[in-house]
């Protein structure tokens, strides 16, 4: 149980385009979803927290207009990287937490974004 | 505020020898503590977690960790390393309680296992 999927697993795009990444909780209702960014050989940095049906809360230094997060249902959150640039290239990982999972977050497999 | 310090960025062991990955934490509340493993270009897999029950926690793949409040430590151990254990390991703290707390990650420890 408590499986989280991400799609796509990897994506390559041209500079200036927008990319959408989906995060789904497959077998539980995720009241809260988290988006992390991981640079090579570094730890995960929390970008934003989203609760179903409300606006995401962004961490300091994360541009909310550039990284659009939507959590429209209890099983789906999306992260859209708008007008992507090469410096946005990174590994993006989502996690999900539900009422029945208490304080534990379940992580997706990650999405590798490369912006040319 | 909460924080995690992983004392070693790299640990090298030989296959069959014990593994020790060190982690110290700081938390204002009764913390929940986790160890995750990440293989290259993969997501995170939970190894084990401490949530105020038994202080010695057993996880998957033979790993275990002991919560020591007096030392604010949560070191990860395994009696005998296997080649497949080579990966990045993250110690994570959550201040628990409300259920709306966030996770704070350590910088990670790369475990290298040689034959």
Image (cartoon, rainbow, N blue to C red):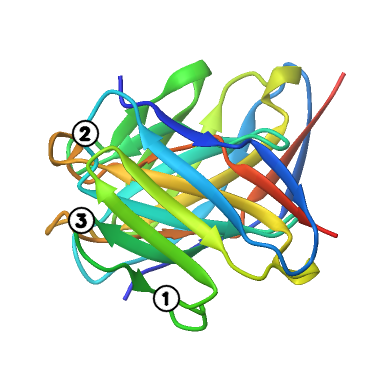
| Real-space CA distance between mark 3 and mark 1, rounded to the nearest whole angstrom | 19 Å
Quadrant (top left/top right/bottom left/bottom right) for the N terminus of chain A? top left
Mark found first going from the N terminus, 2 or 3:
2
Quadrant (top left/top right/bottom left/bottom right) for the C terminus of chain A? bottom right
Q: Position of residue B91 (x, y in %)?
A: 49, 49
Vertical placement of residue A41 versus B112, above or below:
below
The residue wearing badge 3 is B96
Extreme residue in the bottom direction: A61
Task: Kindly indicate whether the residues beneath marks 2 and 3 are on one polypeptide chain.
Answer: yes
B52 or B70, nearer to the observer: B52
Extreme residue in the front direction: A17
The residue wearing badge 1 is A59
Element at badge 3?
loop
- Disc 3 sits on a residue from what chain? B
Q: Position of residue A48 (x, y in %)?
A: 40, 66
The numbered mark at residue A106 is none
Relative placement, left or right, of A28 versus A79 is left
Vertical placement of residue A3 versus A97, above or below:
above
Relative placement, left or right, of A68 versus B30 is right
């Amino acid at each position: 149980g408590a499986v989280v999927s991400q799609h796509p697993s990897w994506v390559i795009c041209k500079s200036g385009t927008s990319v959408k990444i989906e995060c789904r909780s497959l077998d539980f209702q995720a009241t809260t979803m988290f988006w992390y960014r991981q640079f090579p050989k570094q730890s995960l940095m929390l970008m934003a927290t989203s609760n179903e049906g409300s606006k995401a809360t962004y961490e300091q230094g994360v541009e909310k207009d550039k990284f659009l997060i939507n959590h429209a249902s209890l099983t789906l959150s999306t992260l859209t990287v708008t007008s992507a640039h090469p410096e946005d290239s990174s590994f993006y990982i989502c996690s999900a937490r539900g009422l029945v999972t208490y304080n534990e977050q379940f992580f997706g497999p990650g999405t590798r974004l490369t912006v040319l | 505020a909460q924080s995690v310090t992983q004392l070693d960025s790299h640990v090298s062991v030989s296959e069959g020898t014990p593994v020790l990955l060190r982690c110290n934490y700081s938390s204002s509340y009764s913390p929940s503590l986790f160890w995750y493993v990440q293989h290259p270009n993969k997501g995170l897999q939970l190894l084990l977690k401490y949530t105020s029950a038994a202080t010695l926690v057993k996880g998957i793949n033979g790993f275990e960790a002991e919560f020591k409040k007096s030392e604010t430590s949560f070191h990860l151990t395994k009696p005998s390393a296997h080649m497949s254990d080579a990966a990045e390991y993250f110690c994570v703290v959550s201040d628990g309680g409300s259920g709306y707390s966030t996770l704070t990650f350590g910088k990670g420890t790369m475990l290298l296992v040689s034959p």
